[in-house]
Amino acid sequence: MDFLKKLAKSDAGQMAMNMVRQNVEEKFKEYTASQQNSVGSTSQSGDTEGQPLWPGPVNKSLPFAIEKKLSSNFSRATYGDGYALVYTPTNYIVYANDDSTCIDHLEYLWKEFDECVLQHNDPVKLIDDLVPAIIREKEQQSDCLPVFFAIVAGFSKYVKQQQEKGGTRFSMSKLNKRGDTPVHVAAEYGTIGLLQCLWDECFDPLTINQNGETILQVARSRPDIIKYITKNVKGEVFDRMILTTENHPTPLEPKYPKSFESILKYTIDNNLPHCLFAPGLLISSSKFSFRDLETVLKILYIQDSDFLGRLHKSQNIFHNINAFSHQQQKLIMSFAKLEMLNVQDSDGLTPIHCIAKSGSVETFLTMWSYGADINLLTNNGQYPMDYALVRDDLDLVKAFLAFDGKYSDRFMKDAVNQKSRKCSETLKKHFKALEETKNNKIEFNNSDPTHRRCKNFPAIKKDDRIVLSIDGGGMKGILALQLLKEIEKIVGNHFLKRFNHIGGTSTGSMITLGLVQYGNIDHVIRQYFRMKDEIFIGSRPYSGEGLENALINEFGRDTLKQLGEKNNIRVCIPVARVDISPPQLYMFRSYDLRDPVFEKDSSNLNWCAAKVVRSSSAAPSFFPPVDGKFMDGGLIANNPSIDILTDCQRLEFERNERNTTKIIVSVGTGAMEKKIDNIDLMKPTTMGGIINTFNQVLHLKDVFIEQLTASDGVTVERARWMAEAMGMAFFRFTPNLEFPVAIDEKKDGALIDAMLAVKYEAITMRNEMLMLASIFK
C-alpha cells in the first residue's frame, strides 16, 4: 500500500496514471492481448474437448419410477440401472447417474430454490443452465454457498433475502473457497441489476479473491459489466484496479463446451478466424445450448475484444447471422460494436443486404435495433430493400417502408405493377399516401385560438419555453415516436433541439428519458424494439425487476436533475402514489419547484431517473408497484400536458416571469373508438337479457377505466384552453387507430403494421405540422 502511495505521488507515477485514465479501454485490451498465447486460439490445434459440465444427453426412452419425493417440485427416481433427479411438474429428467449420491450434490435445487424455480418463466431452461454450474463447482470442491448459485440463476428475491440476513457486510462476505464475494459472482455471472443491488457502500472495489482477481478481472469477458465498473469506479481507485489486473498471473486455459467439438475441428481444419464462421448447417446440427454459446463468446472476447469484426472472404460474422436462432443473435449482438454491423464485403454487401436476400424480418429488426444502416448501396448500386422487393417478402418490405428504407426505381416499378406480387397492394397504398404530402399550403381556422396566434407568431427568443408532452400507453409509445418522426420530417432536424421542457407519463416517461439523453428519435425507436423482449417475458404480471434492469442498462443511474443539467432541459415525470386514499400525483422533476405533496417525502428526490420511469410505467396488472406504493402515472395523468402546463405557470409565478412558455406540443399514443348501442342495467328477465347486461357491465367497467386514464376528449380541451389563457400555441397530435395495439404487444408484425398505419394517419395532421414548422423557423 505504501509503495502505491509513493508511486502515485511521484512524477513517473502521475504520468503513468494519466496515461491509464486517458485510455482505459486500450489499456485493458493490451492486457487481454498479452494473455492470448496462454488462452489459446480456435484457429490453432489444441485441446478442444474441454471439461464436460454436463453428463451428456439423457436417454428419454428409459422408464423412471419415483422413489422419493424431495420437495414440492423435485423427486428422486430409479432410472434404468441408476438414478435420476426429476422435476415433477413436467416430469423432466434433470440429471441421471449410476450413483445416487451424485443426485444429492444438487440438493440446493430442492432445499433452497424449490419455489424460485417454480416461479421462473422457463423452469426447464433455468435448470439446464444451473445444474452444470452446480456440478462444476462440486467437481472443483469450491464449497459454494447457495447464494452463489442464486446469483448465477438470477434469483433476485432470494439474493435480497440473504442480503438482509447478512447485514451491512454481506457484500464483503466470502461465498466459496476461492474467496469470491457476492459482487465478484455478480460481475462474472449475474445481471447488472444484481450487481447494482449487491454493490453497496461497504464493498471495496479493490477486494481480490484467492486467485488475486478484482471484480474488473472476473468481468473481463463481459463488456457490459466492464462498462458499468469503469463508470462507477473513478480516479486512483480505478488506476489501482488496472495495476492489480495487469500484475495478475496468467489465467487458466479456458475449456470449450463439448457441444462445440465438431465446430472447433472444422474451424481448425479450414483455418477460419474463429469458430462462429463455421457453416450454418454445422452450427444448427451441433445443438449447443445458449449457455454453451455464451461461454464460447466470452473465451473469444478474452482473446480479442474485436473478434466479431474479423473478416473471412471479406465478410464478418454478421453477414451470416441467419445461421443462428433469434436468442443466439441477440446474445452475439451484445458483444458487437456498431461499426461491425455496417461492414461491406468486396461486392459492397452489408449484413442487412444479406438478410434482405435470405433472412427474416425478425433478424432484420434485431440488426436494425442495434444500429445497422438499412440504406447503404452495394458496388452495383442496390439498396437492401431492392433485394426484399425481388424476393416479394411482404413482411420485410413493410419493415423497410416503416423505417424509411430507400429503393431503386426499377425494382420498385416491377413490384408495384405486377399484380401477382404480394407486395403490390401495400406499395400502391404507400405511394398514394405520398401523393397527399405534396401540398404544403397552410390553412388557418379562425375559430381555433392557436391558428389565430400562429398567423402572426412572434419570433422565438432564447429564453422562451417550448414544451413537449407525451402520453402513456405501453408499447403504443412506438406510435408516438412514429408521429414525432413524421413531424420532424416537416419541421426539420432541429425539431427536437427546440424543446427545453419535456415530460411524459408511463411509456411517455421512457420516451422522455430517451429523447433527453440521446436527442434522436430513431435511437429511441430502436431502443423499444431491443427492450420489448427483455421487459415482457412470460405472462402478466411481468417482472418489475426485468423492467428496471432494462431501463438501468439503457439510461444508467443519473437522476432527473443530473440529466436536466447535462442537457440544459427541464424534465418532469408524473407518478401515482396509491398507498393512500385518494391516490396522489407525484411529479418528479429535474428542476426546483415548491410542491407540498412532494416535500412530505423528500427522500424520493434522489431516485435515479430509471427508477422514476419504472414507477411511472408500473401499469396495474402488468407490473408490481415500486416500494409497494408508486404506480403508473397514467392512473391520474395519462396525458400529462395539463400538469406540465401547471408547472410552467407555477415556475413563472415563483420566478417572476410572465408568458415565457410559448408553445406546447402534446403527442398521444392513439386510441380506438368503442361503441355500444345503449346502457341498460335494469334487472334482466331472459337469458339474452342476462348476457346483454353482462356485456354492458363490462363496457361500463371500460368506461370507468377510460375516464380514469383519459388522454383525449375533455383532458385535451382543458389543456388547450389553459394554454390559450397563458398566451401559448397548443398542438395536439394523436392517431386514430383502426385496430387494437396491446400495452404489452411484442409481435414484430403487429408493431410494424401499426407504425405504417400511423405513418399514413399522420398525413391528416399535415396542416398542423406545417403550422408548427412555420413558427419554428
Image (cartoon, helix red, strand yellow):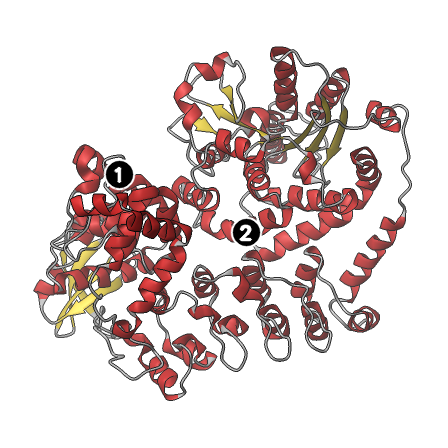
Q: Is residue 231 left or right of residue 381?
A: left
Mark 1 lies on a secondary structure that is helix
User: Does residue 753 sit above or below 62 in this rendering?
Assistant: above
Q: Position of residue 207 (x, y in %)?
A: 20, 46
Q: Image quarter for residue 94? A: bottom left
Q: Position of residue 147 (x, y in %)?
A: 20, 47
Asked if residue 117 shows in the view, the reply is no
Q: Image quarter for residue 692? A: top right
Using the image as rendered, state which of residue 628 and residue 677 is in the foreground.
628
Using the image as rendered, state which of residue 632 and residue 595 is in the foreground.
595
Residue under numbered circle 1? 160
Residue under numbered circle 2? 746
User: Does residue 252 sit above or below 523 in this rendering?
Assistant: below
Q: Is residue 483 left or right of residue 270?
A: right
Q: Nearer the viewer, mark 1 or mark 2?
A: 1
Using the image as rendered, state which of residue 648 and residue 612 is in the foreground.
648
